[in-house]
Amino acid sequence: MRNTLLCCDWGTSSLRLSWVNTQELQIIDEVSGQEGIASTYNAWKESTDKNISQKEFFLQKLQQQINVLATKLGVDLNNIPVVLSGMASSSIGLEELAYAEVPFALDGSKATVRSFEKQPEFSHETVLISGVRNQRDVMRGEETQLIGLVHLMNLPDSKQKEIVFVFPGTHSKHIQVQNNAIINFQTYMTGEFFNLIAQHSILKNSIKNPKQEKLTEADWEGFSRGVQESAKATILHTLFSVRTNQLFNHLTKAQNFFYLSGLLIGTELRSLQQKTVPQIVLSSGSNLYPFYQRAIEELQLTDQTLVVSPEIIDKAAMVGQVRIFEQQLTPI
Amino acid sequence: MRNTLLCCDWGTSSLRLSWVNTQELQIIDEVSGQEGIASTYNAWKESTDKNISQKEFFLQKLQQQINVLATKLGVDLNNIPVVLSGMASSSIGLEELAYAEVPFALDGSKATVRSFEKQPEFSHETVLISGVRNQRDVMRGEETQLIGLVHLMNLPDSKQKEIVFVFPGTHSKHIQVQNNAIINFQTYMTGEFFNLIAQHSILKNSIKNPKQEKLTEADWEGFSRGVQESAKATILHTLFSVRTNQLFNHLTKAQNFFYLSGLLIGTELRSLQQKTVPQIVLSSGSNLYPFYQRAIEELQLTDQTLVVSPEIIDKAAMVGQVRIFEQQLTPI
């Protein structure tokens, strides 16, 4: 069990727990599920046992996941240290930690962490990693993924040229890196907006999710038109074209579903079309990847864009956690 | 009863029926309520009487309103012609009419209308006014209000300089006028977005409607900050500052409620900050007026902006309807 760690990437709506060989940076085995921070917090709020603290409740839930993994593997995982990143350090998580600030060094040396000793009920030394803030924005989790990414990838020198890492999602992040440090970042509410509009706006009557495995050429045509349209005005106005596409029979409802996606992703990515286009690194392990890839082509940003391989994305958070954990052990 | 008309402005969520002296362009009396096109259409859909057509159902409902007005006044309103504008000509209205196209003359001569003879069940000659479309947008109702506005107002000559009329609302309209004709227009989903975000997004936890009659200075400060912030990036990104305002204790939740409003209205109105700022006419009879007025000040557009008086806004739709109705009687 020497040189192993339990790495937990605990997001708002998901949990992933990996048993990791830290010397080879390989995942030995893992469990994952929908037991995210938000539902765990709600479960604590609704718990009838009022003597259990928020932190104790989260550690109980985490221990349950460790037990699942131990049973699956038939090994004893007690006493193996745990490292956590993501929303676990938020006000609705295990314990709220203040954000680290930019510039944030990508060797992990500037991470804000808190260490907990082993306890009778949780026999794991634990390191909780906090997020990062700037003057107007926050993130929790992406900073750790990014530490892993830059460790695993052969990237252009960020001393020469700014690199922007794009992490698509419910709340997409664009992270600017220079001299191997995060100097700034922005959140785009792209994914949340898509869901809001598709579920609650008047436009929901103009679109239809075809729910097929693969997009047709006609679907992609709808998506591309959305990306192009996003150049014309603020999204507050361009969105109404989803309605007129249907009224004027310009697109089918299925095409219009992807048109809406193109409008939103196009609006997000156009912020990268600056005077000096930076080096872009697209980091998406989700089903959003082909849409961001296509939008980057439409916006003629392909030459400036590196795409992170699925294998590296899969390991990024874990490697970032190991790197930060090891920083904690390093004598100054 | 000579020289009188029944003027009905029938919107998605409201109905206003006025008995009008057409020579003096004065409202004699009126009724108004929430019986809009959408709820009337739904009532027809849910009606158990399957023998009644959509049109018959709408005429019944309209007759009920006429009866209310007649009873209120103690007069017989039978045989007085009816003129309708707004959503009554939409697919969910009395009868769907094709849109008129831009350029759309503001003397009313290019309006698309349909006339119906008196019927046993509806003893009113009826003129239904359709909306206007361009290549990518539609409106129903604002074109008629605008015909009334230009008739009532002493406006600068639109031959010299383009005029943009701003109609705030759930779906705000910006209408460009040149040579006394609508040459183009755009819908902004500003009001609908405000409601979507305030009710359904993660940001709903960061704001609170103080529900007081008058805004405090601190509330206005929040609003102004939102307008300023809207310059910085696409609304997909700036919206996330509603969350960080709360996380960082930059604003109270009440201030943040108005900050969100400022962000959205600011984003909408920034489209008016072109190289050559046009003449702007702000036409808002609703509770949105002070917010648009304040945003126009913040954006330093006050010198280019005329504000329509409440009396004129109140009569605009009616006067537009009378003007179009009279066009119908004019021999070519």
Image (spheres, coloured by chain):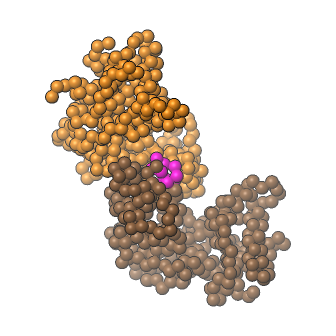
Chain colours: A brown, B orange
Q: Residue at x 33, y 44 (%)?
A: B138
Left/right of residue B69 with respect to residue A274 in the rendered view: right
Quadrant where the C terminus of chain B is found in the figure: top left
Is residue B287 visible in the rendered image? The answer is no
From the image, give the main secondary structure of the stretch colored magenta.
Answer: helix
Where does residue A87 sit, x and y in percent of width and height? 63, 65
Q: Is residue A203 magenta?
A: yes
Left/right of residue A210 with respect to residue B25 in the rendered view: right
Q: Residue at x 74, y 69 (%)?
A: A62
Q: Residue at x 48, y 46 (%)?
A: B194
When asked about the image quadrant of residue B160, the answer is top left
Of residues A160 and B292, the one drawn nearer to the viewer in this rendering: B292
Q: Is residue B248 magenta?
A: no
Quadrant where the N terminus of chain B is found in the figure: top left
Q: Is residue A68 above or below residue A247?
A: below
Q: Residue at x 80, y 59 (%)?
A: A52
Where does residue A257 sit, x and y in percent of width and height? 44, 58
Of residues A177 and B36, the one drawn nearer to the viewer in this rendering: B36
Is residue B38 visible in the rendered image? The answer is yes
Of residues A80 and A69, the one drawn nearer to the viewer in this rendering: A69
Where does residue A29 sit, x and y in percent of width and height? 68, 81
Give the magenta range: A196-204
When asked about the image quadrant of residue A279, the answer is bottom left
Where does residue A125 sit, x and y in percent of width and height? 75, 76
